[in-house]
Each structure stands twice: as C-alpha cells, then as structure tokens.
Image: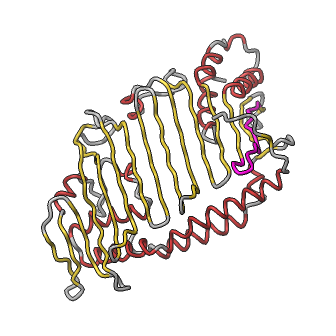
Amino acid sequence: MKIRAFLLLGAFALFVGACKDDDKEKFSSSSPEEHRESMENNALDVFGKLKRGVDLESIDLLIELAQLLDNADLEPGIYAADFNRSIIDKLEIARVLPGLKSTSDEKFSFKEGFEAYVGIYTYNSETESWDKEEASNELTFKFTSKEGKAVVTTLDNVSTFSGVHPGLEYELADFPTSARYSLKADNKELISMNFVSVFDSKGIPSKIEEVLKVEDFEYVYKFALTSSVYSIEQMYKYQDETLLSYLFENKGSFDTEELLTGEVDDVIYDGMLSNSNLRVTVGKYRAEGKADWNGLNKKLTSVSEDDITSEEEMAQLIADTYNKYIDIKIRDTKAKTIIATGEFYAYEDDYYDGSWDINMRMVFPDGSYMDESFFQDGFTDLVTEVNEFFAELENKFRGIR
C-alpha cells in the first residue's frame, strides 16, 4: 500500500475537523445519547434562525425587482438580475470571478457589462418600462414596491483589473477589485455589501474580502494567499450572534501559480504544506484541529517499504503516525468541554483479502464511537425541517432563478 495514498486520505480526513486548544478543558461527562439530542437541538436552533432569511422584506424586494426587470425585457436587466440573484445566494462574488454569466450562457466582462449599462433607471408603471438617466459610475434601479415603498438599489464604486489568469479557459479577464451595493426602502438601508480584492500581474488574488449585511443577517468572506499562507474564512451572523463559521488556514512555502492552476499533485507529499488549521463552528459546537504535515511527512518518508512485512503493519504505522501529528476534537464551546476526539485506526478491507486500510472516527470519553449510525439513528426533526425549508425556497423563488 502506497504511503502517498495514505497521505491523500489524511488530507481528506483533516476536513472532518482539525487546531489544538487548551487541554485544560475537561472532557464532557454527558452520554453519547445526550450529546446526540443536544447536537440536534443546537442544529435546529441554528437552522431556525437561518430560516428567518426567507421572509425578509429585502429578499421580497429583490424578487420584485427581478420580476420587473424580466417583464420589461430591459437589456441592462440581464446584468443586474444576475447580480441581484447572487445577493439571494449570499452574494459570493468570489464564486463568479472573473466574469458574471448572463442568462444566455455567454460569458462577458464584469467591467464591460457594468460600463455598458451604467445609469439610473426608474420604473414607469404606466408604460411598464424603465426610464434612463445618464450616470458615470453607478447602476441604479428605482421603483415603487407593491407595498408603496420607494425602493432604490445601487451598484457603484466598481473598479477592475485586467490580467491573464493562468487557470482560465480564455486569456484576458477582468477581475473586480472593488464594488459596493445597497438596497434602500423609504431611505432605510436593508442591504449593504462591500467587496475588495487585490490581484498580481498574473491575475492571481492575494486578498479577497466581502461583507454583506441583509437586515439582521451578516455574511463575511475572507481569502488570503501569499507565498507562506493560504487561508479562507467565512462567517454567518444573526443579530450579532455567530451561527456558522469556517476557518481553514494552511502555512508553508507556496508557488501560488502552481497551486491555483492545479499543477501540484500533492501539496503535502511535495513538501509545499507545513501545517494546517481548521475550525468549523455550528452554534455552540466546534470541530477543530491541527495537522503538523512537516512532522508527519518526515516520519513517513523515513520508513522504507522494504522494512514493512505486511499491509497490516503499514496501515498500523500510518494510523499511529496520524494520531501523533494530527489532533482533532469536537468541543461544546458554551460548556467548555471536549465531547469527542479524533482517532485514526487500521482495519482489514472486507472486499479484498489481506488488504488493509485506515480510517478516522470520533471517540467519546466513554470509548464509544461517533460513526454514521450516530446521525442516522437521530436528527429526524432536523431532516424534516431542512426538507420543508428547501420546498419553501423552491416555491418562493420559482420563476426568477
């Protein structure tokens, strides 16, 4: 069994959770059954707050605007509707870099699209059309809502950088370096978004930051890439309470161009990655951990496969090495207790005689495991809530997606 294969498995396993914290925290005394009930209640609480976003006034106004733009067949409406719909999708601008995609499935430049359609458009309900007023650096739509409110949406402060990205299908691309968006109803701001990014001459980003506020909700996205650090951070808040957060940080010696174009086969095996940290938080529960890839790689590369007498011995060596250099925990942040720790173990593959592999499981303080059955035997209320929620979303956004 190849050491490289185990390294790939370890890289995947890290995503389950990986950052060593204060080991003075105590292990939880609750039973696995009590943890399962608590985790479902925690998820239901978080999900219940996220669901409130469906009924926000601002989302209804975006839907109303999208319908007016579609019905009037306004040429700038294709551009604006794509942008406004992305607000509903949490406005992940990084996902649509370097160019927005029109409804005709044709790629076009973010810069050229904005410059072609800048202006102030006011909806005329009598003619069911949009009257245009010239403007230099803003794309604004004004209309009166069904509730009689004066609604104004504005995309401005737009700047771009043109460069050749080594990983793109086409050569020249426009990269947004700044953008600001707002939606106001009767002069009350319901949505605000600020976006900034920095690219080098090759079109490789070193920084992307976005803050989107939609009434009581806030979404934050941060990306950083240098020759020594690669990190992504996302956070969802409701009324200043963090509901969901994600932080993934890698440190090492990176060739940013090779990293983004996929020319590197294995960042661990090739020595590019030295250590990783990951934290995923849902309500009061947080999966976290730390991986020392330098130590792990040195240990495994020092082992000669000629010295290994069997696949079982190799698998056990790999599992022991992972347990030494990868630390994984799940915490209850309110109770300040550790509820489970990660454990790598060797096992014999049932499908191939004499074949051994490794896997990872979370272990409770009483020695029992958090495997698939832990979630399959519970969380029925959460599954029901999620299914009903997506059915509601499908019904609400039908016709404008």
Q: Residue at x 64, y 40 (%)?
A: 288
Examine the rendered structure and indicate whether residue 351 appears above or below residue 273: below
Q: Quadrant of residue 357?
A: top right
The residue nearer to you, when weighing 293 against 78, is 293
Where residue 390 appears, x then y in whole percent?
55, 68
Where residue 96 appears, x then y in whole percent?
36, 52
Examine the rendered structure and indicate whether residue 161 appears above or below residue 188: above
The residue nearer to you, when weighing 370 against 249, is 249
Residue 242 lies in magenta, yes or no?
A: no
Residue 217 appears left or right of 73: right
Furthest toward the left, the residue is 134
Residues drawn in magenta: 332-346
Q: Quadrant of residue 6?
A: top right
Where residue 371 appears, x then y in whole percent?
76, 47
Q: Quadrant of residue 136?
A: bottom left
| Magenta-colored segment: predominant secondary structure | strand
Residue 45 appears left or right of 356: left
Q: Residue at x 50, y 28 (%)?
A: 251
The residue nearer to you, when weighing 2 against 112, is 112
Locate the C terminus by quadrant: bottom left
